[in-house]
Image (cartoon, helix red, strand yellow):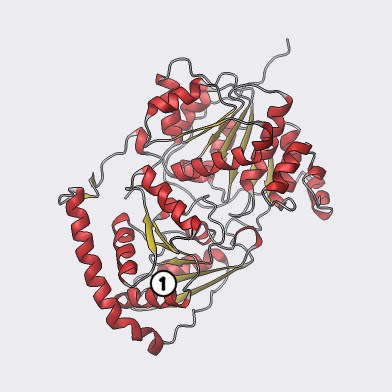
Amino acid sequence: MPPIKKRKVEDAPVPIDDADTGSEPEVNEENEENQEQDEETPSSFKDLGLIEELCTACETLGYKKPTPIQVSSIPPVISGRDIIGLAETGSGKSAAFSLPMLQGLMSKPQPFYGLVLAPTRELAYQLSAAIESLGSTIGVRVVTITGGMDMVPQSIALGKKPHFVVATPGRLLDHLENTRGFSLKQLKVLVMDEADRLLDMDFGPLLTKILNAIPSQRQTLLFSATMSNKVESLQRASLSNPLRVSVASNNRTTPTTLRQSFCLIPAKNKDIYLSYLCTEMTGKSIIIFCRTVHGAQQLSYFLRALGFGAIPIHGQMSQSSRLGALGKFRGGSRSILVATDVAARGLDLPAVDMVINYDLPGDSKTYIHRVGRTARSGRAGLACSLVSQYDVEVWMRIEASLGKKLPEHDAPKDEVMVFAARVSEAQRQAVMQMKDYDEKKGNKPGKKFGKTFGAKRGRDQMDQEEG
């Protein structure tokens, strides 16, 4: 029996420090074949070596031709290579690892063939739905394992031995340690989606334990929109001779079909300008990003008082409420989704017309993922950021990271200030509704939505966005 080359997982624990330089390692230049392949881009999924059943599934889902990340990733994954895939949001990363993984299952059917790790509950459910859709013609079985849900039904589902498990790290480790009979010792493929977010959310120690609990002799696929030094460390700990595939021009890329702008305004007039932008986009779908859970909840009340169909989504809502909010937004019964950064990563919300940064993010990486909720898969989109006198320095850093100055949004002051009286009344109503909401939740001073600030989150809450 030939010797097995093992990865040194135990000796290379995943770092969880905060030193993230935001720099991206150089793309591996030794692969000149990929450059030649880009010149003759395959026009169909069949050209990538996918079997007929999967090509049919792609046609059914409306995938007309493969995206660049799919063209670059699918053939080497089918051949068994480990992959690091870097691409802008909305570029088709999910199908880039799902399709070859499904093809591998067809060639060697077995339970627990693949494991997909995601940083948040919503992304896990989305990835699970994508794999089920692509594998509908071959009868694939997928189980989603996240925090915030009862472990007993999850244990029963795992006992039925699905082909794929899509999970967040904390709850998966709970099952590996406590669910009798559940093991991933026969796992063939590990996928880590949004890997930089997995590390930003302090999943590093849990990832190390999971890597120790699965076979070292496996195929590993690591995908993200951005690359950092921490992700580079994770790569060294978990991948074997990986092929790096990047279709992004640099580490700070936004879609070319995205039109970005900003409004430089006094902080006291922020709500007035927001109401102007929402009125300007009446009938269109909008995502508004806030910094805090409290801010998102109150802003949704404010917009409803103005007559807009707004619904919040944040980490302190129950899992069923969050999925319900996403469902209403996707279905069109609500045109405005007021979100904290729980919705900024990975979620595929089709046909979002505009993203508004009500509160600026703290860094350019989060900005890119926020605005990446629109202009997906070649569609056009708008992004506008409200920049107050306190945000100028942060905004200048974001522009510097993007490598360009963004234009100011055309919002004539006399037209905007017409909304002042209505906004003042809506603000008053929102404050009253927020007070009632807090009382019903039983919140006390020092707590926000029933959670003490500064408290360390347990394993089961790590896939839930912090307030």
Q: Position of residue 189 (x, y in %)?
A: 62, 29
**Position above or below: 81 against 390:** above
Q: Position of residue 171 (x, y in %)?
A: 42, 31
Q: Position of residue 92 (x, y in %)?
A: 64, 50
The N terminus: image quadrant: top right
Q: Quadrant of residue 403?
A: bottom right
The answer to whether 204 appears left or right of 305 in the picture is right
Residue with the mark numbered 1: 386
**Position above or below: 119 against 141:** below
The answer to whether 453 appears left or right of 90 in the picture is left
Local SS, label 1 = strand
Q: Position of residue 106 (x, y in %)?
A: 71, 28
Q: Residue furthest top?
A: 1
**Position above or below: 118 against 342:** above
Q: Decide which of 234, 82 is in the foreground and name it.
A: 82
Residue in view at x 36 percent, y 59 percent = 291
The answer to whether 260 appears left or right of 71 in the picture is left
Q: Residue furthest bottom?
A: 414
**Position above or below: 182 against 332:** above
Q: Decide which of 87, 250 is in the foreground and name it.
A: 87
Residue in view at x 36 percent, y 33 percent = 459
Name the amino acid, label 1: Leu
